[in-house]
Each structure stands twice: as structure tokens, then as C-alpha cells.
Amino acid sequence: GRASGRVRSALTPAAVDGGVDTFYSALDRAADDRRRLVAAGLFALLGWVSFVTPLVTAFAALGVRISLALALFAVPVVSLINIVPTPGGVGGFELALAAVVTGLTGLDLGTSTAGVLLYRVTNYAFLLLVGGLASAWLSVSPATVVAKIGES
């Protein structure tokens, strides 16, 4: 509370109790609707599998088979490396993932590195494509585009 009045008021016992109560009431609401809870869990699982499947397919493109279980384990664990600041944020994840794949599969480091780099390139290309399309869609209203086409 010595940092500022805002911090002091946010950390009063009443404010903390209110925050905890809000959290538990949201948790109770989520647990009360089992269908939505199961749907959310399935969507989370689908997202996780969708995020790591490109690693399996990147290695398959190189003629190497790695298991989906390895990808489901390695990618989230190695993602913890992102807490370590690296210049530009590049390289730490790739190095760690290549090392984990090499250690758990016995592949040589060159093949592991090639598979991981292919995974990152395809992952980023997809995210940039989807993000770019979403940004374009949100930046330009469809009515404006139709009007411009109509003027041509």
C-alpha cells in the first residue's frame, strides 16, 4: 500500500474478499452449467491439439514420425521458456523444443532443429494469415468495400 493510494485501496481486506467472492461466484456459475463446461473443455482440448498438430506434420514432411503424445507434452512444457527474456523473443523456444525432441526421440539435433523451424514457420504463417484477415475485416467495413466495388 505504500506504492500508491490505488494499490492501498485495492488491497484492503474488503476489496480482497470481494475479489475472491467474485471469483468463486463465477466458478460456481461455470460449474452449474455442465453442458457449457464440457463444451469449454472440448474446445480447449481441440485448441491444444490444433496448436501441436503442426509439429507432428512438420516432422512428417521431413519423413520423420513423432507421436502426438510427444507434441502434446513438449510444446506446452517448452512454452514455459517464454518467461525468460531473449533479444527479440526469438530463438529460446526453438532451441529448447529442438533439445526436448532430440532428448525424447533420439533424433539427431539437425533433424530436430529442421522440424522445429518448419513448425514455427508454418505456425507463424497461419497466425499471420488469420490475424491479417481478421484485422482487415475489422478495419474495413464490408459496406465500404461493396461501395468501392460498385463505383468501379
Image (cartoon, helix red, strand yellow):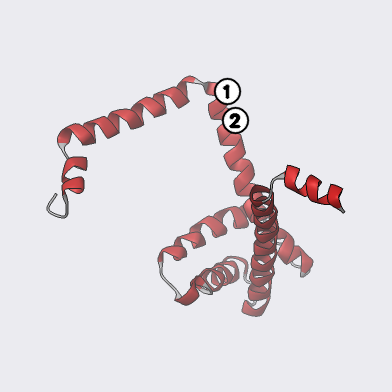
Residue 22 percent coordinates (x, y): 33, 29
**The label number, if any, that marks residue 35 in the structure image:** 1
- Quick check: 27 left or right of 123? left
What residue sits 62% from the left and 78% below the top?
109
- Please say whether residue 107 is visible from this viewpoint: no
How far apart are labels 1 and 2 at the CA level? 6 Å
Residue 73 percent coordinates (x, y): 55, 55
- Quick check: 50 left or right of 149? left
Q: Which residue is mark 2?
A: 39
Using a 10 Å C-alpha cutoff, classify the residue at mark 2 as few (fewer than 14 neighbours), some (14 to 19) or many (20 or more).
Answer: few
Q: Does the residue at mark 1 contact the one at mark 2 (Cβ under 8 Å)? A: yes
The image shows residue 80, relative to residue 49, as above or below, that is below
Could you tell me which secondary element the residue under label 2 belongs to?
helix
Observer-nearest residue: 98 or 132?
132
Observer-nearest residue: 4 or 55?
4
What residue sits 52% from the left and 68% below the top?
93
The image shows residue 13, relative to residue 72, as above or below, that is above
